Image (tube, rainbow, N blue to C red):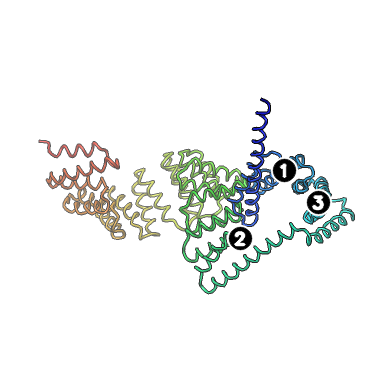
């Protein structure tokens, strides 16, 4: 019975060992490809292969230190974890020179120079002819000398020189070193060839051929990042931003999210494809993960979230921007805007005030003052504070027309029509081609029963903007209710509905005109049309339209 159980277990162990060897070979091959081409798919294959090898055969020493190298380079583990992995490899196989080399390498990265030197010396004893180990030891000793504030000795320099020279001499006879040098030289030669030929093709305006050359070379070079960048440049020149984006995105991936490459990709997307909001969010998120205190990235993220109408995310991003630059008025303004979107007006007011106190730019501050005035007037109902804020902003800007108009709107809302007219006219003094101001001024004159002036200014608004549906509707109201000219009014209402078929008020007013002329059927059709559209837009009180329709046919 005992024997029958033992044999299958042995076979299982043999199978695991065989599988582990095959997995290790595949992982090593992927690792080598990654070193040559810097392809992230190869990186993932190598990492997964080493992990699977360890699970199949926990005593496979090389899998530990190779895995530690890749994970550390990829930013998935820290230096201490990498050292622990290599110590495990040394413990499993004390006579494996490579295990000592890798452990020494990570110890030197952690500035444990003496312990690293000991590991390298052990590796040299185990493998005396290794040029690589001697060269790395020499570099480690030089790094130690460089970082030591005191205690540098002639012996340290002599040892570093000895190992450096002996390593250099031995490299001529070290097969591993020779193979690596040859591979690198071949790849460098091919890259130089592609680069030179491609540059010539670009200069003679054969960009398509140059692009295809780089494309054919990109899979066979560890310098594919530079080739993709050249391809992107050609695509931009040929007005193919979609292809350029794919190339630059590959650059970001292959560079393992190198901040400079990410920044270049952001600059491209913002200039050529600023509708790729999610992509920009991903890129800025990469940057803040690498540089958590880089406030500008949070600021840009906030505006991107505003574009997506993700108000909470925008608020969080602007808060983080202010956390790292608490006195920045631009960040204060943006956070205030986010609070407005969430209807947290008191917080917004405080931040707008802080931004105005800083006043980094007069014209900018004038805009901020207008935003604050809008809250005072529309939310807080404090028209006096709003007008005061706008009057102060007039001192900051050369473009006063918009502010005069805003002040006039407030005076109109609080029924101070004379002051409203005064400020609308001041707005027109600077912007006499603005149809909206003419229309608002006409409305103010209508409120004062100045019918002729109302007609003049509405007509001027229409002259400046023949598609101004509101002006047509309002001018129709003047003729209908001011002059009793229903026939003339219908013309303006009809034009308003032709410009904007869903304009409920214009349909309603046209119905009133037909009703005034005794045309009940035509009036009923327009009231019914207004009812149907209003179900979707809720522009008017439903009962108001319905009552006018039913009263048409009352006896």
Residue wearing tag 1 = 61
Residue 534, by quadrant, is: top left
Secondary structure category for the residue under label 1:
helix
**Residue at figure coordinates x 57%, y 59% from the top left:** 219
**Viewer-nearest residue: 6 or 302:** 6
- Left or right: where does residue 183 sit relative to residue 487? right
Judge whether residue 108 can be spotted in this image. Answer: no
Q: Residue 127 carries which label?
A: 3
Asked if residue 140 is positioned above or below residue 5 in the image, the reply reads below
Mark 2 closeness class: few <14, some 14–19, many ≥20 residues within 10 Å? many
Q: Which mark is residue 221?
A: 2
Image coordinates of residue 456 in percent, x first then y, are 27, 57
Q: Distance between the residues labelled 3 and 2?
A: 32 Å
Which sits earlier in the primary sequence, circle 3 or circle 2?
3
Mark 3 closeness class: few <14, some 14–19, many ≥20 residues within 10 Å? some
Q: How far apart are marks 1 and 2 (CA)?
A: 30 Å
Asked if residue 509 is positioned above or below residue 177 in the image, the reply reads above
């Amino acid at each position: 019975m005992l024997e029958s159980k033992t044999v299958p277990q042995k076979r299982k162990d043999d199978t695991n060992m065989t599988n582990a060897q095959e997995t290790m070979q595949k992982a090593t091959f992927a690792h080598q490809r990654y070193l040559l081409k810097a392809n992230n798919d190869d990186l993932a294959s190598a990492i997964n292969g080493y992990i699977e090898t360890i699970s199949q055969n926990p005593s496979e020493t090389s899998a530990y230190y190779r895995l530690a190298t890749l994970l550390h380079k990829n930013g998935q583990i820290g230096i201490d974890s990498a050292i622990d992995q290599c110590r495990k490899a040394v413990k499993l196989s004390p006579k494996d020179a490579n295990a000592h080399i890798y452990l020494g390498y990570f110890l030197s990265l952690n500035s444990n120079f003496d312990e690293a030197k000991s590991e390298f010396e052990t590796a040299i004893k185990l493998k005396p002819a290794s040029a690589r180990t001697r060269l790395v030891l020499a570099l480690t000793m030089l790094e130690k000398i460089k970082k030591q504030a005191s205690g540098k000795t002639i012996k340290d320099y002599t040892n570093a020189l000895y190992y450096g020279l002996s390593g250099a001499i031995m490299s001529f006879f070290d097969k591993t070193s020779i193979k690596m040098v040859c591979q690198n030289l071949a790849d460098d030669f091919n890259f130089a060839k592609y680069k030179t030929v491609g540059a010539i093709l670009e200069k003679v305006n054969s960009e398509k051929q140059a692009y295809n050359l780089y494309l054919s070379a990109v899979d066979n070079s560890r310098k594919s990042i530079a080739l993709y960048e050249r391809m992107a440049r050609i695509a931009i020149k040929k007005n193919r931003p979609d292809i350029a984006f794919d190339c630059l995105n590959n650059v970001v991936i292959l560079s393992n999210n190198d901040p400079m490459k990410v920044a270049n990709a952001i600059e491209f997307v913002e200039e050529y494809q600023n509708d790729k909001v999610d992509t920009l969010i991903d890129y800025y998120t990469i940057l803040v993960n690498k540089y958590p205190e880089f406030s500008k990235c949070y600021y840009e993220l906030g505006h991107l979230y505003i574009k997506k109408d993700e108000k909470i995310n925008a608020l969080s991003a602007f808060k983080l921007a202010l956390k790292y630059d608490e006195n920045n008025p631009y960040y204060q303004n943006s956070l205030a805007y986010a609070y407005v979107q969430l209807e947290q007006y008191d917080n917004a007011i405080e931040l707008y005030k802080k931004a105005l106190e800083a006043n980094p730019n007069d014209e900018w501050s004038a805009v901020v003052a207008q935003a604050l005035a809008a809250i005072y007037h529309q939310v807080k109902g404090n028209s006096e504070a709003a007008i005061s804020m706008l009057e102060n902003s007039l001192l900051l800007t050369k473009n006063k027309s918009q502010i005069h108009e805003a002040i006039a709107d407030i005076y109109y809302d609080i029924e101070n029509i004379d002051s409203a007219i005064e400020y609308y006219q001041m707005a027109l003094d600077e912007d006499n081609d603005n149809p909206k101001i003419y229309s608002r001024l006409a409305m103010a004159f209508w409120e004062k029963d100045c019918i002729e002036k109302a007609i003049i200014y509405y007509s001027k608004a229409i002259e400046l903007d023949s598609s101004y549906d509101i002006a047509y509707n309002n001018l129709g109201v003047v003729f209908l209710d001011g002059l009793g000219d229903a026939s003339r009014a219908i013309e303006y209402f009809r034009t308003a509905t032709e410009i904007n078929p869903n304009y409920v008020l214009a349909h309603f007013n046209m119905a009133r005109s037909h009703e005034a002329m005794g045309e009940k059927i035509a009036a009923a059709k327009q009231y019914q049309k207004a009812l149907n559209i209003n179900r979707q837009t809720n522009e008017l009180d439903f009962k108001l339209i319905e009552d006018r329709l039913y009263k048409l046919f009352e006896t």
